[in-house]
Image: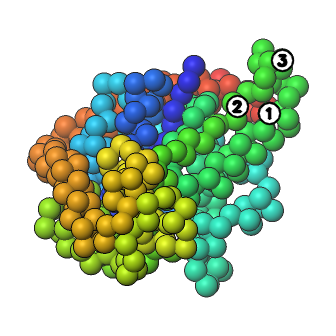
């Protein structure tokens, strides 16, 4: 079976980067794959989260998932900490993954900042937990933004090493091509890496201290308009060919955002807007963004009024996730050599 797994951290409201880099593909894949979408709260606490904020963000991100168009009847939607196997499998995979592999992870270097000694061990181990999330369901496809590419490669390396280390047991259990499928990254579309609106060389991020750097999925029309109006640009007109965007990160970013929101390619957008100044392009971008994002914000506001419904979606999703994960994890324990009742 083709099985999709992906997740987002409940550290803040979702932003346009999360939406265009990942969510748009999550929604589409519901039509073609069995989909499991997680609110990765265990990942969130790798950096300090105030408990009352975390609680709110878990429900907020779930509401955003639903408001964006994830369908809890078709997809499994749940929060990671309700399915204990994620943490249990992560431990086993910690003993498969090598220190040298983790030492190469660039996200840890960025998020740990200057004082690496003061970073949590969880932050360092983040990519192993992510591998566990995916492999626990023997997922085959992982739709993510470009920034997660390196972590996906690590997940494949871990799966591969597990398959080789335990090849004898795995074969004896009747698996011909290894126990874990090597998960395929699914990183596609015109906006796999949405950049900050204030600095075209930095990724749009939840943790950017400037709210002007990102469009949040809950921003109202006036806020969206203000942020795009203030978005950094260069003084030139838009080029008519994609090659003309080279060395112009801000222009490249805004064209990519427009293309992704319109369901077009960057080349199509430049056919229409090549030669236009930003003073003409930005209003069109604002209209498009408001038209696409306002219904999502409205639906999220509606859902927020019913936390019981949200908690019910998560409980139901967790039960369904557990039903898939339990037999897989039982098999992993047997392969490793644990004795159970
Ligand atoms: N700027 C982005 N462009 C495209 N895709 C992005 N994603 C995140 N930022 C961008 C994708 O969104 C999914 C969920 O991300 P996450 O919440 O797990 O990851 P994150 O990197 O922690 O998000 P932020 O916003 O960058 O938070 P901070 O500021 O805490 O680092 C993933 O598929 C990710 O690729």
At 49% across and 73% down in the image, what residue appears?
A: 248
Task: Describe the element under mark 3 as helix, strand or loop.
Answer: helix
Q: Quadrant of residue 37?
A: top left
Residue on which the image places disc 1: 163
At 32% across and 36% down in the image, what residue appears?
A: 70
Q: Are marks 3 and 1 in contact (CB under 8 Å)?
A: no
| Spot occupied by residue 214 in the image (x, y as percentages of width and height) | 33, 68
Q: Is mark 3 within 8 Å of ligand 1?
A: no
Q: Quadrant of residue 302?
A: top left
Q: Are marks 1 and 2 in contact (CB under 8 Å)?
A: yes
At 43% across and 60% down in the image, what residue appears?
A: 240
At 66% across and 55% down in the image, what residue appears?
A: 150
Q: Alpha-carbon distance for marks 1 and 2?
A: 7 Å
Q: Quadrant of the N terminus?
A: top right
Residue on which the image places disc 3: 172
Q: Earlier in the sequence, mark 1 or mark 2?
A: 1
Residue on which the image places disc 2: 180
The reply to whether residue 252 is in sight is yes
| 86 or 276: nearer the viewer | 276
Q: Horizontal placement of 178 versus 3: left or right? A: right
Q: Which mark is residue 84?
A: none
């Amino acid at each position: 079976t083709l099985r999709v797994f992906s997740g987002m951290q409940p550290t803040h409201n979702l932003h346009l980067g999360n939406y265009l880099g990942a969510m748009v593909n999550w929604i589409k894949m519901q039509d073609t794959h069995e989909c499991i979408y997680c609110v990765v709260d265990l990942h969130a606490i790798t950096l300090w989260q105030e408990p009352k904020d975390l609680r709110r963000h878990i429900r907020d991100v779930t509401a955003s998932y639903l408001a964006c168009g994830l369908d809890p009847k078709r997809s499994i939607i749940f929060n990671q900490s309700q399915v204990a196997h994620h943490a249990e499998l992560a431990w086993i995979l910690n003993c498969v993954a090598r220190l040298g592999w983790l030492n190469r992870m660039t996200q840890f270097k960025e998020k740990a900042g200057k004082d690496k000694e003061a970073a949590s061990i969880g932050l360092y181990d983040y990519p192993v937990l992510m591998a566990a999330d995916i492999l626990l369901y023997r997922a085959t496809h992982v739709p993510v933004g470009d920034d997660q590419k390196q972590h996906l490669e690590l997940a494949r390396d871990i799966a591969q090493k597990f398959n080789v280390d335990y090849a004898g047991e795995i074969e004896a259990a009747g698996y011909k091509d290894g126990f874990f499928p090597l998960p395929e990254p699914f990183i596609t579309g015109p906006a796999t890496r949405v950049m900050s609106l204030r600095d075209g060389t930095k990724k749009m991020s939840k943790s950017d201290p400037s709210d002007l750097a990102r469009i949040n999925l809950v921003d109202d029309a006036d806020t969206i308009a203000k942020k795009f109006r203030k978005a950094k640009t260069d003084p030139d007109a838009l080029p008519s060919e994609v090659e003309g965007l080279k060395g112009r990160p801000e222009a490249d970013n805004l064209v990519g955002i427009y293309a992704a929101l319109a369901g077009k390619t960057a080349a199509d957008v430049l056919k229409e807007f090549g030669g236009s100044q930003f003073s003409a392009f930005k209003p069109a971008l604002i209209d498009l963004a408001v038209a696409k994002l306002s219904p999502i914000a409205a639906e999220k506001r509606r859902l927020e009024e019913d936390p019981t419904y949200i908690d019910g979606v998560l409980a139901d999703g967790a039960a369904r996730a557990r039903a898939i994960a339990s037999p897989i994890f039982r098999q992993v324990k047997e392969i490793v050599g644990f004795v159970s009742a």
